[in-house]
Structure formats: structure tokens, C-alpha cells
């Protein structure tokens, strides 16, 4: 029935290493996010000054280190064989991820520049919310494109079950992105409409709930990346394709 063509294992090997690098980078970011929530909740009870200083230090180390690891991992995933059909999605995801990372790095500079204009507190709050809205939208788009990349890789290693999981997770990511955007937009509209204090409190609680949901989605996203890395290690055969080149070799017949 023809020949079974398999890609050079070294290409998928680096893709697998890249996925694991992304996974551990996300673990570091999730740890930072969890630490941030704990500091907000327990901050008033932390009277020991060194304990209060520990939070920002860990945030800088884990947050920055995790972000760099995620970008490096995405870059390594670009070594995936072109025949898998997912390299373009990986490239778009990486470009958006780098953009979001740079926006996060220069957020403080942006807020400082906005404050120098002396346009009022509400204007600064609105500028900060818009900046955050843009950054989150780009970040969620990066997640979506990377899931499309993983979906193609799953199909290329003959794992339709993982491809289906990628589609389900993609819908979850899109839903979380929409809820996050609507909530942040509501914070921008409320001061204009003259919303009362209870409505602001309710919206704040909703924002916390959505943040927790987003954190849970990020955990699912990272676990799926780890699962894909394991699947590549177990078996990385690509379905037969009419291609030629030194990266492909005949491994047997069906």
C-alpha cells in the first residue's frame, strides 16, 4: 500500500523540548499569579517587613524568568517539520507573544508618561484599562494560534483525540477572552454612566471570579502542552505524504 514516511526525529525532538520549556515557564507564571492573590488577601496580616519584600522579588524572578522561558519554548517549536502544517500558526503565536511581553515590560513607562500629562485620575485609570485590554487581547490571540499549531501537530502524529482536545480548549480560551474583555470594558463604561458603588463592587467580584477562571484555563492549557510533549515522545510518525527531501526517509511498508 505504499511507504510510511517519518520525519527526522531531531526536528520533533526540539519541538518537544520547546513544549516542555513552555510548560515550566507557565508553571512559574501561575506560581507568580497565585502568589499575587495571596499577597492581596494576606497583605494586611503580614507585619514582618522581609515577608512583604519577598513577594516583589519572587514576582520579578519567576514572572520575568517564566515569560522568557515561554518565548524561548515558542521559538524552539518553530523547528516543527513544515509538512505538519502548523509552523505558520506557531510563528503568528510567537509574534503576538513577544508583542504582549513587550507591552507588559513597558506598561510602567506608559503609565508614567500618561501621568506626566496631568489629565486627571479617571483618564489615567481609563488609559491603564485600555492598555491592559489590548495586552490581554494579544495574549489570548497568541494562545489561540498556538492551540491551532498543537492541533495540527496532533493530527500529524496521528492523535485525533488530542486534536479534539485542542479544539475544546480553544473554545474555552476564546470564551475566557470574551468574558475578560467584556468585564474590563465595563470598568471603562461605568464611570461614564454614573454607576453606583454596589454595582462597582459586584463588577469587582465578577472580575476576581473571571481571573480565577482564567488562571484555571491557563493550568489546563499548560497541562495540554505537557500532554502533547509526551505524545511526541511516545510516537511521532507523520501520516504518509507525497514529499521528498533529506529530512524524510522510508521506514517501512504498510
Image: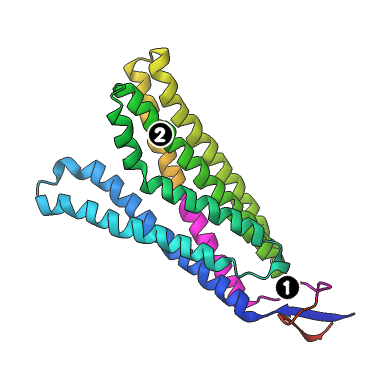
Residue at the disc numbered 2: 207
Q: Earlier in the sequence, mark 2 or mark 1?
A: 2
What residue occupies the far left of the structure in this picture?
A: 48
Classify mark 1: residues with Cα within 10 Å, few (<14), some (14-19) or many (20+): some
Mark identifier at residue 238 = 1
Where residue 95 appears, as percent x and y from the top left, is 54, 53
| Label 1 residue SS | loop
Residues shaded magenta: 216-243
User: x, y (%) of residue 74?
Assistant: 52, 62
Left or right side of 101 for 76? right
Which residue sits at x=16%, y=49%?
A: 52
Q: Quadrant of the C terminus?
A: bottom right
Main secondary structure of the magenta stretch:
helix
Does the magenta-highlighted stretch encompass residue 238? yes
Who's the residue at 77% across and 72% down the image?
239
Foreground disc of the pair 2, 1: 1
Amino acid at each position: 500500500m505504499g511507504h510510511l514516511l517519518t520525519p527526522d526525529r531531531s526536528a520533533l525532538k526540539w519541538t518537544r523540548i520547546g513544549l516542555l520549556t513552555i510548560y515550566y515557564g507557565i508553571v512559574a507564571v501561575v506560581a507568580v499569579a497565585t502568589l499575587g492573590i495571596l499577597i492581596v488577601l494576606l497583605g494586611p496580616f503580614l507585619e514582618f517587613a522581609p515577608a512583604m519584600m519577598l513577594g516583589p522579588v519572587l514576582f520579578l524572578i519567576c514572572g520575568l524568568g517564566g515569560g522568557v522561558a515561554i518565548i524561548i519554548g515558542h521559538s524552539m517549536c518553530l523547528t516543527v517539520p513544515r509538512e505538519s502544517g502548523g509552523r505558520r500558526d506557531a510563528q503568528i503565536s510567537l509574534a503576538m507573544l513577544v508583542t504582549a511581553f513587550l507591552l507588559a515590560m513597558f506598561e510602567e513607562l506608559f503609565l508614567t508618561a500618561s501621568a506626566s500629562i496631568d489629565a486627571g485620575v479617571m483618564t489615567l485609570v481609563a488609559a491603564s484599562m485600555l492598555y491592559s485590554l489590548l495586552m490581554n487581547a494579544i495574549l489570548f490571540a497568541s494562545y489561540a494560534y498556538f492551540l491551532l499549531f498543537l492541533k495540527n501537530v496532533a493530527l500529524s502524529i496521528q492523535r485525533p483525540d488530542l486534536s479534539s482536545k485542542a479544539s475544546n480548549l480553544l473554545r474555552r480560551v476564546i470564551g475566557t477572552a470574551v468574558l475578560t474583555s467584556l468585564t474590563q470594558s465595563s470598568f471603562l463604561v461605568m464611570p461614564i454612566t454614573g454607576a453606583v458603588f454596589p454595582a462597582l463592587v459586584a463588577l469587582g467580584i465578577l472580575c476576581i471570579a473571571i481571573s480565577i477562571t482564567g488562571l484555571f484555563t491557563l493550568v489546563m492549557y499548560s497541562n495540554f502542552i505537557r500532554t502533547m510533549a509526551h505524545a511526541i515522545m511516545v510516537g511521532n510518525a507523520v501520516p504518509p505524504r507525497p514529499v521528498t527531501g533529506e529530512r524524510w526517509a522510508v521506514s517501512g511498508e504498510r
